[in-house]
Image (tube, grey):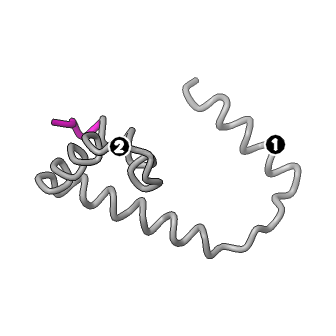
């Protein structure tokens, strides 16, 4: 049986069909029993679908640099 944390770590592999049969079965069993993880999976699917529809606009260099700096230091 997967934990919720394990499921969140495996969701990308699940959505990209990169799991063994047994891992996929364990994933589906958990999804069938956990409404919170079902909601998370649905949210991930919607995010992927939405991002696939966005146009790629360049990020101005100053904003890109600021974002990268904040992501590097997010734990501080």
Q: How crowded is mark 1: few (under 14 residues within 10 Å), some or many (20 or more)?
A: few
Say which element carries label 1.
Answer: helix
* Magenta span contains residue 63: no
Magenta stretch: give its range: 1-5
**Mark 2 near mark 1, Cβ–Cβ under 8 Å?**
no
Question: What residue would you read off at disc 1?
Answer: 65
Q: In which quarter of the image is the N terminus?
A: top left
Is residue 63 positioned above or below 8 on the image?
below
On the image, the x and y values in percent for residue 67 come to 72, 44
The vertical placement of 58 against 17, above or below, is below
Furthest toward the right, the residue is 61
Q: Residue 5, image x and y in percent?
A: 29, 36
Comparing 5 with 31, the one in front is: 31
Taking depth in this image into account, of 5 and 65 the one nearest to the observer is 5
Position of residue 20 measured from the top left corner of the image (x, y, whole percent): 34, 41
The residue to which callout 2 is attached is: 8
Circle nearer the N terminus (2, 1):
2
Q: Quadrant of the C terminus?
A: top right
Q: Residue at x 47, y 54 (%)?
A: 16
- What secondary structure predominates along the stretch shown in magenta? loop
Q: What's the CA distance linking mark 2 and mark 1? A: 29 Å
Residue shown at the point (80%, 51%) measured from the top left: 63
């Amino acid at each position: 049986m997967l934990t919720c944390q394990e499921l969140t770590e495996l969701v990308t592999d699940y959505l990209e069909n990169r799991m063994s049969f047994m891992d996929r079965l364990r994933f589906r069993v958990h999804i069938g029993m956990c409404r919170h993880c079902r909601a998370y999976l649905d949210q991930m699917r919607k995010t992927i679908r939405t991002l696939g529809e966005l146009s790629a606009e360049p990020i101005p260099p100053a904003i890109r640099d600021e974002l990268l700096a904040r992501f590097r230091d997010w734990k501080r």
